[in-house]
Image (cartoon, rainbow, N blue to C red):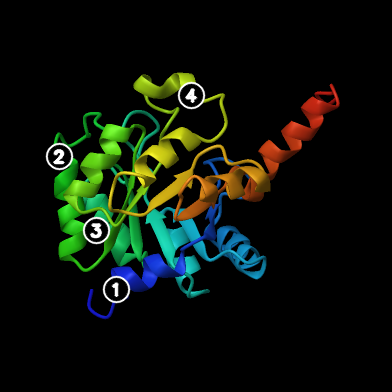
């Protein structure tokens, strides 16, 4: 893993910037590595400073096409801890070309019963960086203490302890609280649906903002418009 950019280089490139999450769900028409590569290129052309993507094939395709900082993850499963859930997954994401490995750093049990610290340390030992996806303030503090290079609010609203926040837009309160108290850059992610929300996240202290659905998921975007018209199709 030699020759990887330093933490300062990658993280600095993302300061005050937009990271676009290029992902499609299994079974969808866009669930294809080459399609995600093209989506990433389109995001770059629009001014994105970084890309977040999932799946080893997608990461390899995107890494071969552009040189923006690449945040990678591997979703394995659909419940509980499934975002890069083990050290094995994390190292495979790094090997596929990610500069930063995103992983679930919540306090929920992991599928291999190993601590999240093990995954973070494995990535760091291999020369990579970790973005810890958290749902609460306490999880963010712990992730920073364990050596994560970035802490993201990605999972706020998606864990049993935070389900009540899911319908409230991005968790800017969590962004602001973490940004004001930990020595690690905070990334605002989760339900950022408008440019105004993205700008507000930076005002709350976010180092960078991740937007996915509102840019790269046409099925959801179409649904928003259809619902506003009161029409659900033929």
Mark 3–mark 4 distance (CA, rounded to whole Å): 32 Å
- 51 or 138, which is in the foreground? 138
Of the numbered discs 2 and 4, the one sitting upstream in the chain is 2
Mark 1 surroundings within 10 Å by alpha-carbon count, few (fewer than 14), some (14 through 19), many (20 or more): few
User: Label 3, on which residue?
Assistant: 91
- 224 or 34, which is in the foreground? 224
User: Label 1, on which residue?
Assistant: 6
Of the numbered discs 3 and 4, the one sitting upstream in the chain is 3
Residue in the picture at 44% in, 21% down:
163
Q: Is residue 50 above or below residue 155?
A: below
Mark 4 surroundings within 10 Å by alpha-carbon count, few (fewer than 14), some (14 through 19), many (20 or more): some
Q: Nearer the viewer, mark 3 or mark 1?
A: 1
User: Label 4, on which residue?
Assistant: 165
Of the numbered discs 3 and 1, the one sitting upstream in the chain is 1
Q: Nearer the viewer, mark 2 or mark 1?
A: 1
Residue in the picture at 21% in, 40% down:
142
Question: Quadrant where the C terminus lies?
Answer: top right
Residue 17 x/y as whole percent = 53, 61
Q: Is residue 97 above or below residue 35?
A: below
* Tag 2 near tag 4, CB within 8 Å: no
Q: How many marks?
A: 4
Of the numbered discs 2 and 1, the one sitting upstream in the chain is 1
Tag 4 secondary structure:
helix
Mark 3–mark 2 distance (CA, rounded to whole Å): 15 Å
Tag 2 secondary structure:
loop
The quarter of the displayed image where residue 22 is located? bottom right
Residue 181 x/y as whole percent = 30, 44
Residue 86 x/y as whole percent = 22, 45
Q: Is residue 196 above or below residue 51?
A: above
Q: Nearer the viewer, mark 3 or mark 2?
A: 2
């Amino acid at each position: 893993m030699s020759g990887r950019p330093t933490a300062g280089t990658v993280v600095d490139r993302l300061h005050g910037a937009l990271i676009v999450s290029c992902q499609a769900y299994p079974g969808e028409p866009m669930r294809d590595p080459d399609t995600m590569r093209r989506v990433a290129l389109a995001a770059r052309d629009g001014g994105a400073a970084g890309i977040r993507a999932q799946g080893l094939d997608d990461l390899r395709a995107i890494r071969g096409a552009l040189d923006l900082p690449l945040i990678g993850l591997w979703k394995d499963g659909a419940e509980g801890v499934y975002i890069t859930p083990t050290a094995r997954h994390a190292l495979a994401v790094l090997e596929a070309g990610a500069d930063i490995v995103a992983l679930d750093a919540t306090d929920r049990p992991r599928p291999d019963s190993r601590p999240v610290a093990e995954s973070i340390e494995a990535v760091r030992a291999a020369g990579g960086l970790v973005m810890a996806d958290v749902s609460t303030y306490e999880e963010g503090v712990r992730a920073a203490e364990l050596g994560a290079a970035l802490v993201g609010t990605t999972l706020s609203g998606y864990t049993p302890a935070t389900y009540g926040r899911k319908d409230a837009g991005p968790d800017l309160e969590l962004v602001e609280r973490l940004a004001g108290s930990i020595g690690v850059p905070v990334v605002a992610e989760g339900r950022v649906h408008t440019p105004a929300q993205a700008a507000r996240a930076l005002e709350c202290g976010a180092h960078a903002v991740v937007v996915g659905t509102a840019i790269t998921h046409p099925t959801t975007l179409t649904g928003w418009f259809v619902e506003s018209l009161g029409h659900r199709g033929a």
